């Protein structure tokens, strides 16, 4: 099969790779309906994370083609969506809703989902079957549910978004934009998207943003304060992962408010004393997407949400490198790769 | 009147100071029934915070001797307890329960409560009158409510302590010990006190601790994991404020669990990546003691709790310096200073 491999910063190739097969009796193999590039894939592309002939991709939706002997919850032929983190969904941590920290879990599994097929460990706990075979126009949204939608949703839940609240969103990538969508669904009264790109501002408004703030850093914080009677937002979603974005999020939150942070943390050091006196709640990390998948799939199935709109560029798998470039240069929000 | 003044590290003197009077129409003056030394007073005593002929003390309980023209909620003769942070208790932040960040608040007010009298700003919002004049044996507990009890209680609430939960407490000072008491009152199933001092272990058990862990740092974390099926505690109370204690608290918490931190942060830098992947909730800061005061006063009044037991040394105000030394050398958990 063909799959995407990264050899180093800026060096992505589509190669012939071995088609995965069942290794553990709890595995499933899926044929991807489509695959995509994640904002977090840009960290190694830009040299911030190490790679060494690394198969890329951790977002997936598609049809089960084989299952191991122990798999009971999905069958060959089912259309499934799963999380980037394989989990048994039965351990005490999973049952508490933190499947991304499952005690039997496999971080980063499946790897290499930018490909025609993928092996999914712990299939029973990881995969959720859709109510039937989806119409083609639902595929992008179901693929988004696998990570960016679930991650934006978790950020909103971690930030305790709810009715009557003012929410600020730091980061206008796919996760930030879907954080806006989640905030709207969770009943936020006011949603302030922080973005200086017209296309992303437009999508943020379509997803439910009521205000746009173009300023960043401390200027951005000042604007948020101006919009919130000097207090700061009740809930702030952080979807970048840098020192600047984390401090922008913390400083934009009122005392007693909540920061939900899901940008993969890079070179961040939080100053203890400032955090202490801020009085905010801080929660985040790798999103337990599996917790939200059944509800998110249903919302998509019912066409109540259309998170697939974050895909503003579609390319064939063979052109994956161009997809990485387009996202790196912010010419695309998120790239869908077709595998037919 | 006599009051405690700190001139530099290790240099505390009891001096004649001007007796406070009404300055603002929202002020009240109280005659202290007793006063005390806080663990946080040891930071400047040890040279970690600057002082310059600074009147010391922020914990107080006593009788109102004068009120400003705008004060309506307390009267001369009332016995009152208040928080170390003066708050109007009516602003949006106060109403959300974060009186320690009141938009009209006065941090650190009152200052100089290690004295015979103190001026309390924003008396209507800050002070809570007891149901009547307290019996003498209740004075230590009411004084404890002013800070250390309210702070330990807030830490337990911030750590989402509740029925069925396992709670670990980092720090065996008065706040940590009262965090144990709070955890017990809030229904925790198991309470692990981290302490290597026999007298503090005994008081922790009396307050409700079910287990004692003597190890610190990563060894302490290992012990907590051993006691919790390898998962970590659901809720961890941090009551020290150092890098080691914060990391011990975060690492002792299971993914999805809660850290409530109230130790005043000193030279702490939280590593973003570790925090991200820990998946814990983090909340804390200067405790909004005022939120809890009515309930805490009632529990004391009903003799359901006896937080005054943290005072294991009583000295006359004139011997304040010896009180500081005793706490610094850990010969005393907390020192009560009589003002008669």
Image (cartoon, coloured by chain):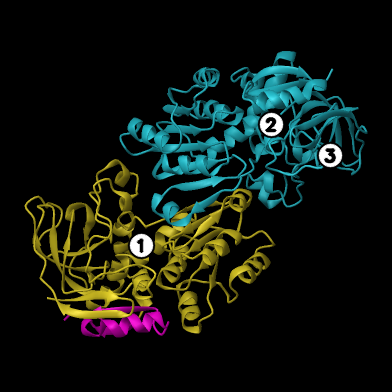
Chain colours: A yellow, B cyan
SS under mark 1? helix
Q: Nearer the viewer, residue B259 or A11?
A: A11
Neighbours of disc 2 within 10 Å: few (<14), some (14-19), many (20+): many
The N terminus of chain B appears in which quarter of the rendering? top right
The span from disc 3 to disc 2 (Cα, nearest Å) is 18 Å
The span from disc 2 to disc 1 (Cα, nearest Å) is 45 Å
Q: Mark 2 points at which residue?
A: B38
The C terminus of chain B appears in which quarter of the rendering? top right
Q: Which of B180 and A270 is in front in this view?
A: A270
Nearer-N-terminus badge (3/2)? 2
Q: Mark 3 points at which residue?
A: B53
Q: Does the magenta stretch include residue B192?
A: no
SS under mark 2? loop
Chain designation of label 3: B
Above/below status of B339 relative to A21: above
User: Which image quarter: residue A266?
Assistant: bottom left
Q: Mark 1 points at which residue?
A: A150
**Residue in the picture at 31% in, 74% down:** A37
Which mark is in front, 2 or 1? 2
Q: Residue lying farthest left?
A: A69
| Residue B227 badge | none
Q: Where is residue B224 in the image (x, y as percent from the top left)?
A: 39, 33
- Give the extent of the magenta segment: A313-340
Q: Are marks 1 and 3 on the same chain?
A: no
Visible residue check, residue A43: yes
Chain designation of label 2: B
The span from disc 1 to disc 3 (Cα, nearest Å) is 55 Å
Position of A319 with respect to A154 (left or right) is left
Q: Position of residue B16 (x, y in %)?
A: 91, 29
Chain designation of label 1: A
Q: Is residue A332 magenta?
A: yes
């Amino acid at each position: 099969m063909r799959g995407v491999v990264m050899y180093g910063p800026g060096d992505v190739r589509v190669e012939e790779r071995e088609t995965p097969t069942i290794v553990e009796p709890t595995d499933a193999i899926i044929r991807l309906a489509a695959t995509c590039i994640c904002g977090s894939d840009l960290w190694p592309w830009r040299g911030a994370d190490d790679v060494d002939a690394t198969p890329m991709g951790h977002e997936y939706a598609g049809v089960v083609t084989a299952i191991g002997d122990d798999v009971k919850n999905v069958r060959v032929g089912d259309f499934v969506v799963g999380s980037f983190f394989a989990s048994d969904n039965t351990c005490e941590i999973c049952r508490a809703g933190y499947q991304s920290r499952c005690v039997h879990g496999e971080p980063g599994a499946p790897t290499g989902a930018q490909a025609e097929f993928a092996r999914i460990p712990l299939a029973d706990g990881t995969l959720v079957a859709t109510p039937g075979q989806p119409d083609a126009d639902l595929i992008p949204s179901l693929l988004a549910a696998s990570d960016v939608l679930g991650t934006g949703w978790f950020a909103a839940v971690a930030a305790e978004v709810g009715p009557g609240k003012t929410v600020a969103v730091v980061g206008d990538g796919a996760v930030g934009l879907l954080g806006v969508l989640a905030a709207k669904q969770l009943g936020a009264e006011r949603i302030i998207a922080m973005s200086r790109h017209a296309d992303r501002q437009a999508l943020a408004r379509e997803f439910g943003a009521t205000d746009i703030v173009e300023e960043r850093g401390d200027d951005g914080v000042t604007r948020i304060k101006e919009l919130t009677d000097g207090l700061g937002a009740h809930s702030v979603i952080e979807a970048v992962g840098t020192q600047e974005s984390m401090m922008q999020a913390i400083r934009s939150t009122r005392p007693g408010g909540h920061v939900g942070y899901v940008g993969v943390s890079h070179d961040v050091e939080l100053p203890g004393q400032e955090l202490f006196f801020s009085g905010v709640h801080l929660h985040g990390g790798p999103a337990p997407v599996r917790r939200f998948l059944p509800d998110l799939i249903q919302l998509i199935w019912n066409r109540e949400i259309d998170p697939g709109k974050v895909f503003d560029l579609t390319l064939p798998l063979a052109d994956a490198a161009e997809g990485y470039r387009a996202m790196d240069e912010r010419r695309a929000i998120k790239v869908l790769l077709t595998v037919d």
